[in-house]
Image (spheres, grey):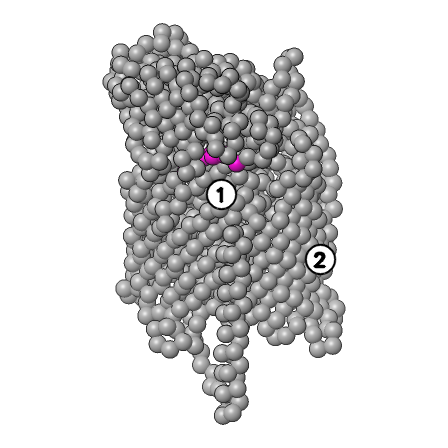
């Protein structure tokens, strides 16, 4: 079934392109019969101009690149860079907490992220959190799918370069701003966004100068709903005595958050002479998220199991159970997160003569993440609990004989009190020299060097459950300690109504009082020394590349060939481990472009790329949670940690594209790609022996893998249509990917995590008479979320196909004032995933429910101005 939408997308691309070609041919024929057509200058603005600029970047680039261009300030109908990138061919995003999150290029998260060509990061990660960068600050985003030696290394998936505005981008004084109010339907709350930009440039006695300042503030309230089944382990059916698989936990959770983001961007440019430019750029972002989770944890085996309903498809698995005296947990998990990141950069560009350019710049990055969370578990016993594990893919729980809103029925149980801090700092310097040639085989040569020095530290407290010194009834505690959860989980499908648990605000605002109930001293717990790690990483990179050109008959050919050589020196310390790595990577690449016709281009590219492991993945610590019981239900010992022996991911990359340019904003393109990976990093759970006991330990491992696929894309404005219809336009793209890697646990091969076999975007556009509108549908087929969750049940988690429909519209009231309306998740989509694989209880392949999730629909109204 998944093939049909992809085939429809493909057929649409070629049907529309053929119609366009025919239209173009008719126009040319008509002109040749009469006199030459008169040339008329057409000034294009808005979406048309943005698409034309993005297409021009793609057509003129030696590399294979897709771009988003914000031709007008604040014009992008998306809130963040992550939101905007989901429309790009071959790009998918993960979703949660009311927004687009991780950006995947061709299914892979291993990207290098740049700000104006400079490396940027958040916390101890390799890349920056793109959702922290508001769309209002953007000039554009370039997604490089092939590499050249002058690009910063680090992205086996690709490179994302976020281009922020500078004062010399404008002709003179520019003042712009805007605001929007945002309603989220599931949380039933409003948020808001605001932005402002001021830029000007002046002629002075010491040269031309420009200064630009911009700011953005975004507050968003959100609610995510999840109903879940967990992995199964066997119990005896009381009726037959046969062993039958029953989930260890079944339940649901509401996550309510209040997220605030601030961003400030400044840029100064000075041109003391026509051949010299000096600049200083700065970006500061702050992220605050205060959220809590109301958790309902049903324990189907923690009580007296009186009956078991077998699964009609897999009799060795239960479809439901009835439990008397059912021990059940409710929990509030309160979180307070803060991230601050800034980048300061200074550099110069000097044209030594008409053919030689020298550039150099120095950059400082600093990012700090502080997390605090307090979790309090409460419990109750229900006379009867009826669990159904699969009602249309969603579990359903019916609690009978107890009032879930009465504090007298709940007992204080367990406290988890944790906090952490991670700091990352980096100095980076680079210098480049380019010499261009008027004619001959070589059009330019370019050489350069780059040095980085990055320091990373992370400290945290161990997550230890602390039992209440006196497990009292909640009714004896202060009344503002407890609260009631929302109701109607996942649109009422889970059967869980409103239930009592702790109040998240009380936990964070009265932490010392809560600690006293569990016999703990006042104040934050000290960091656990065994959890700390420190890393110093230095890189030394050198590159050389040559741009060339020649003709094959009447066909022009050009490209870039060269290599980047980078030496990485790393010193990691943590948990008694002092690990040192020193490795050299030689990264050759070649890009070649054939001008098959004036508007038809063929590109071929090959090269080697790397991605270094995230610093958190290198953490040598493994934390263990011993086996035990909850109620009368046992659970196995587990562990999680990093792997200090991880090597960088290495990729051999091969790409080809064929691009047909119909007009300045219309094109049809096709791409094919192949990647071969060494040391591709994925996370697995596997039994490990520690202190004479088996533990199920989750840690990253390096495996070999391959990725191959094709991309098709079409875009056009139908200007040839009469009257209002001439404002219609379309963007259609589709991607087919096959990704596999070696299975380090069971042998053989398996699907790459996060890679959907099919994905597509269908976008209808209208722009005329001051009206601009976009209706966009984004879809991806099923993908593997993770492997090996433990238990006897098949434990590969596979997400179902999912799609989202968004709408945006604006109207130019005057040339300086525009009003806007936007809506996301219009169809109110539901996300579901399942446990799939060979089941040790049944001996056959099984597919059983895991998560059902629902997210907010959002509706925005706003206005923006510029003059």
Asked whether the viewer can see residue 15, the reply is yes
Q: Residue furthest front?
A: 240
> Magenta stretch?
847-853
The answer to whether 519 appears left or right of 599 in the picture is left
Q: 844 or 362: which is nearer to us?
A: 844
Q: Residue 279: x, y in percent?
A: 52, 52
The answer to whether 575 appears left or right of 328 in the picture is right
Decide whether the magenta segment is chiefly helix, strand or loop.
Answer: strand
Of the 4 image quadrants, the one containing the C terminus is bottom left
Neighbour tally class for label 1: few under 14, some 14-19, many 20 plus, Cα within 10 Å: some
Q: CA distance from mark 2 to mark 1?
A: 38 Å
At horizontal 29% and vertical 48% (from top left) the residue drawn is 181
- Compared with 416, 180 (above or below) is below
Mark 2, secondary structure of its residue:
strand
Q: Residue 407: x, y in percent?
A: 27, 17
Q: Residue 690: x, y in percent?
A: 64, 16
The residue pinned by badge 1 equals 800
The residue pinned by badge 2 equals 590
Tell which circle, 2 or 1, labels the residue nearer the N-terminal end.
2
Mark 1, secondary structure of its residue:
loop
Q: In the figure, residue 323 lies in which quadrant? A: top left
């Amino acid at each position: 079934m998944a093939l049909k939408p992809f085939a429809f997308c493909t057929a649409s691309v070629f049907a529309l392109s053929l119609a366009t070609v025919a239209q173009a041919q008719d126009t040319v024929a008509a002109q040749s019969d009469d006199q030459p057509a008169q040339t008329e200058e057409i000034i294009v603005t808005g979406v048309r101009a943005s698409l034309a600029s993005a297409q021009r970047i793609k057509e003129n680039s030696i590399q294979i690149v897709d771009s988003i261009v914000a031709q007008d300030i604040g014009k992008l109908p998306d809130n963040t860079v992550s939101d905007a990138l989901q429309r790009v061919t071959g790009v998918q995003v993960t979703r949660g907490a009311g927004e687009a999150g991780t950006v995947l290029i061709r299914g892979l998260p291993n990207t290098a992220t740049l700000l104006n060509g400079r490396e940027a990061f958040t916390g101890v990660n390799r890349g920056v959190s793109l959702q922290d960068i508001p769309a209002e600050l953007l000039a554009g985003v370039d997604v490089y799918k092939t590499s050249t030696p002058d690009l910063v290394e680090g992205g086996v998936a690709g490179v994302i370069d976020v281009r922020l505005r500078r004062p010399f981008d404008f002709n003179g004084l520019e003042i712009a701003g805007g605001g929007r109010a945002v309603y989220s339907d599931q949380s039933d709350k409003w948020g808001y966004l605001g932005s402002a930009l001021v830029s000007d440039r002046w002629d002075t006695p010491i040269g031309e100068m420009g200064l630009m300042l911009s700011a953005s503030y975004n507050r968003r309230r959100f609610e995510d709903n999840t109903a879940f089944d967990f992995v199964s382990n066997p119990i005896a059916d009381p009726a037959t005595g046969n062993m039958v698989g029953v989930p260890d936990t079944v339940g649901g959770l509401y996550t309510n958050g209040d997220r605030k983001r601030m961003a400030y961007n400044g840029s100064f440019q000075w041109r003391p002479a026509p051949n010299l430019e000096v600049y200083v750029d700065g970006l500061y972002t702050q992220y605050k998220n205060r959220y809590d989770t109301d958790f309902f944890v049903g324990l189907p085996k923690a009580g007296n199991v009186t009956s078991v309903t077998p699964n009609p498809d897999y009799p060795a698995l239960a479809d439901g159970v009835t439990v008397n005296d059912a021990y059940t947990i409710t929990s509030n998990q309160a979180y307070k997160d803060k991230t601050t990141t800034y980048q300061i950069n200074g550099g110069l560009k000097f044209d030594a003569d008409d053919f030689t350019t020298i550039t150099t710049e120095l950059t400082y990055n600093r990012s700090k993440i502080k997390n605090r969370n307090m979790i309090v578990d409460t419990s109750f016993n229900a006379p009867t609990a009826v669990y159904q594990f699969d009602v249309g893919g969603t579990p359903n729980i019916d609690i009978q004989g107890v009032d879930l809103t009465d504090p007298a029925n709940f007992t204080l149980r367990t406290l988890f009190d944790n906090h952490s801090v991670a700091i990352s700092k980096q100095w980076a310097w680079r210098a480049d020299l380019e010499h261009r040639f008027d004619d001959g085989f070589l059009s330019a040569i370019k050489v350069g060097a780059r040095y980085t020095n990055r320091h990373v530290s992370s400290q945290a407290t161990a997550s230890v459950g602390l039992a209440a010194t006196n497990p009292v009834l909640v009714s004896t505690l202060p009344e503002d300690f407890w609260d009631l959860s929302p109701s109607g989980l996942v649109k009422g499908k889970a059967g869980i109504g409103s239930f009592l648990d702790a109040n998240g605000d009380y936990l964070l605002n009265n932490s010392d009082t809560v600690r006293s109930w569990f016999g703990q001293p006042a104040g934050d717990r000290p960091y656990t020394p065994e959890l700390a790690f420190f890393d110093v990483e230095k890189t030394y990179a050198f590159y050389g590349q040559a741009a060339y050109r020649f003709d094959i008959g009447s066909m022009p050919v050009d490209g870039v060939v060269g290599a980047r050589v980078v030496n990485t020196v790393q010193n990691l310390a943590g948990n008694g481990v002092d690990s040192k790595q020193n490795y050299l990577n030689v990264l050759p690449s070649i890009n070649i472009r054939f001008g098959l016709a004036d508007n038809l281009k063929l590109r071929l590219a090959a090269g080697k790329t790397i991605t270094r492991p995230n610093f958190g993945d290198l953490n040598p610590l493994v934390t263990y949670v011993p086996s035990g019981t909850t109620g009368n239900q046992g659970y196995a010992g587990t562990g999680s940690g990093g792997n200090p022996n991880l090597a960088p991911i290495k990729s051999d990359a091969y790409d080809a594209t064929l691009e047909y340019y119909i007009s300045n904003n219309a094109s049809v393109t096709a791409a094919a790609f192949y990647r071969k990976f060494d040391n591709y990093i994925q996370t697995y759970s596997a039994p490990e022996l520690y202190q004479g006991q088996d533990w199920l330990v989750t840690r990253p491992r390096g495996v070999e893998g391959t990725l191959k696929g094709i991309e098709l894309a079409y875009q056009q404005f139908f200007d040839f249509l009469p009257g209002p219809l001439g404002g219609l336009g379309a963007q259609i793209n589709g991607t087919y990917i096959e990704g596999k890697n070696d299975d380090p646990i069971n042998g053989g091969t398996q699907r790459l995590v996060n890679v959907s076999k099919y994905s597509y975007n269908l976008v209808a556009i209208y722009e005329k008479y001051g009206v601009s509108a976009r209706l966009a549908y984004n879809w991806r087929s099923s993908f593997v979320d993770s492997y090996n969750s433990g238990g006897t049940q098949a434990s590969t988690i596979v997400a179902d196909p999912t799609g989202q429909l968004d709408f945006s519209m604006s109207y130019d009231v005057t040339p300086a004032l525009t009003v806007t309306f936007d809506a996301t998740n219009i169809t109110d989509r539901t996300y579901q995933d399942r446990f799939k694989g060979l089941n040790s209880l049944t001996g056959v392949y099984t597919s059983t429910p895991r998560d059902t999730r629902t997210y907010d629909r959002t509706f925005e109204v706003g206005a923006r101005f510029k003059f």
